[in-house]
Amino acid sequence: MAAMARSSGKPGRDCPRCPRLVAFREAWREREPDWFNAPVPSFGAIDARLLIIGLAPGLRGANRSGRPFTGDYAGDLLYATLAEFGFAQGRYEARPDDGFTLVDCRITNAVRCVPPQNKPTPQEITTCRPFLAATVAEMPRLSAVLALGRVAHDTAVAALGARRSSLSFAHGSARPLAYVTLFDSYHCSRYNTNTGVLTAGMFRDVVAQLRAFLGTTPPSPTVGAKFGVS
Ligand code: SF4
């Protein structure tokens, strides 16, 4: 197999690398032509100090709206909590044009295309990883990474150049990894909150920990600006 070309942090709309996900994407383009139905770009400024990594777009969330965590339950909990701790501002209305902005924070996914049943295969996770690695590498002020769930954790560890076995997932942990500190939380999905794996209070504690770690100093001239997607 030919060597994979060096990736930027932005896969093309028709990225062909995962045949199963391409077929799923194409099927939903036919079924719902008004949905985004493409690799979902990262949300937030490139000079943010915090990067949050989710698993993959939800079918009727980010895959429909085109913005990470926008339009499903996980986004309701994530964005309300980020706003409470000053990592976001504006009114979140579950639409990409709602004017809601991130502050010193960027959000991406370990896998950029929606997988069937929210379950990417190990091969798909590995195939999409160069896009995550490029997203991490292009952030000049990156200091903290929050991994939402075990897959995001393992992918973050690998994307930062460490061996996955060197650091296992642990909810509530904050540990040094390469040049950042890696924070872990159970994913803020409806399933996890319905089953009590993660409560809103537990998630709040993780984001409070991030706020304490990063402090409250205004971090960059772009804070308060309306950030687009990239
Ligand atoms: S999941 Fe990533 S690598 Fe696979 S097709 Fe989508 S953008 Fe490309």
Image (spheres, helix red, strand yellow):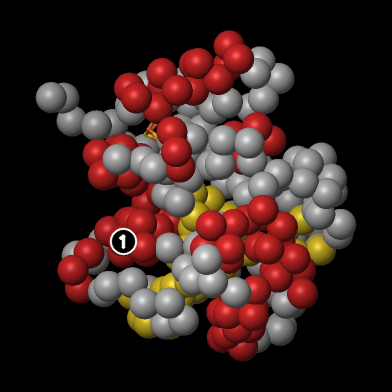
Residue in view at x 53 percent, y 51 percent: 108
Instruction: Report whether residue 89 is seen.
Output: yes
Dividing the image into 4 quarters, which one contains the C terminus? top right
Q: Foreground residue, 87 or 185?
A: 185
Q: Foreground residue, 225 or 167?
A: 167
Dividing the image into 4 quarters, which one contains the N terminus? top left
Instruction: Report whether residue 156 is seen.
Output: no
Q: Position of residue 162 (x, y in %)?
A: 23, 66
Label 1 Cα neighbours within 10 Å, binned few <14 / some 14-19 / many ≥20: many
Q: Is residue 186 left or right of residue 81?
A: left
Q: Position of residue 8 (x, y in %)?
A: 43, 39
Q: Is residue 17 above or below residue 55?
A: above
Say which residue label 1 marks. 154
Ligand 1's quadrant is top left
Q: Is residue 228 left or right of residue 117?
A: right
Q: Is residue 209 above or below residue 223?
A: below
Q: Is residue 16 above or below residue 161?
A: above
Residue in view at x 54 percent, y 27 percent: 38
Q: Residue furthest front?
A: 195
SS for callout 1? helix
Q: Position of residue 36 (x, y in %)?
A: 64, 27
Q: Foreground residue, 70 or 142?
A: 70
Tag 1: residue type?
A: Asp
